[in-house]
Image: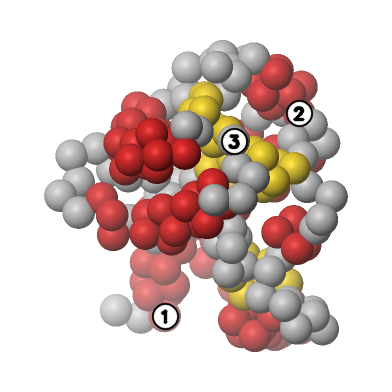
Amino acid sequence: MDSIDKLTEIFKSFPGIGPRQAKRFVYFLLTRNRNYLREFTSLVNELQNEIIICQECFRYFTKGKQVTPLCDICGSKNRDENVLMIVARDIDLENIEKSHYFNGKYFVLGGTVPILDKNPETKIHLNELLKTVEKKAEKELKEIILGFSVNPESEYTADFIIQALNPLITKYNLKISHLGRGLSTGTELEYSDTDTIKNALKNRS
C-alpha cells in the first residue's frame, strides 16, 4: 500500500466520507504547493498541543493561556445551572450556540450509540455523564434536554440515556425533555439552521 492508498484509508475513516471522496481529497493535496502542505501538516500536529477536552462538559476547546480545565461555557457564571443539554457531538453544541437561544450548560456524549451494539457504554461518555448529572442535581439542576438529531440511531441513543439516567431522574425529580419537532424526521442537528433550533428548543417536551 503506497502513500496515496494509506492517506485515502485515513480520509475514509472520517464521518460521512466514502472511498471516492477520500481519493479526491488525496489528489487535491497532491495539486497543492509545498507551503500549503507544510501549513496543513503543521495545523494537524498542533491539534493535540492546542486543543484539550473540558473536564465538565467533555467538549474540545482551545486551551490558550488559561490554567482552568474548563471551557468558557462551563466556566461562565452567567449560564443557567438549572438546565443541562446533552448533545452527541461538539458540532451540535456549536450549532445550538449559534442560535443564541439556549443559555444553560451542556454535556457532549462523544457520539451516538449504534443500534443493537453489545457494549454501548464504550461508545459514549456514559459514566462521566452520570457523575456530572449527580453532581449538578445535588445543586441546582432541574431539567435535562436531550438535544439529538431526529433519526433512528439518535432516538435509540436518547432511549438508552433515559434508561441509564432513570435512577437519578427519580432520585432528584429531574425533568427530561426532547427537542420539539421543529426538527423534521431525519434531520441532523449539525445542519439545522438557527430558526429551526430556536423552534425546537421553544417547543421541547
**Label 3 sits on residue:** 142
Q: Count numbered badges in the picture.
A: 3
Residue 39 position in % (x across, y down): 73, 81
**Label 2 sits on residue:** 194
Does the rendering let one see residue 161? no
Residue 165 position in % (x across, y down): 37, 41
Q: Nearer the viewer, residue 65 or 152?
A: 65
Disc 3 marks a residue whose amino acid type is Lys
Does the rendering let one see residue 90? yes
What is the CA distance from the residue labelled 3 to the residue labelled 1?
A: 53 Å
Tag 3 secondary structure: loop
Q: Nearer the viewer, mark 1 or mark 2?
A: 2
Vertically, is 186 above or below 97? above
Residue 88 position in % (x across, y down): 49, 45
Location of the N terminus by quadrant is bottom left
**Label 1 sits on residue:** 3
State which quadrant residue 58 falls in.
Answer: bottom right
Q: Nearer the viewer, mark 3 or mark 1?
A: 3
Residue 17 position in % (x across, y down): 45, 50
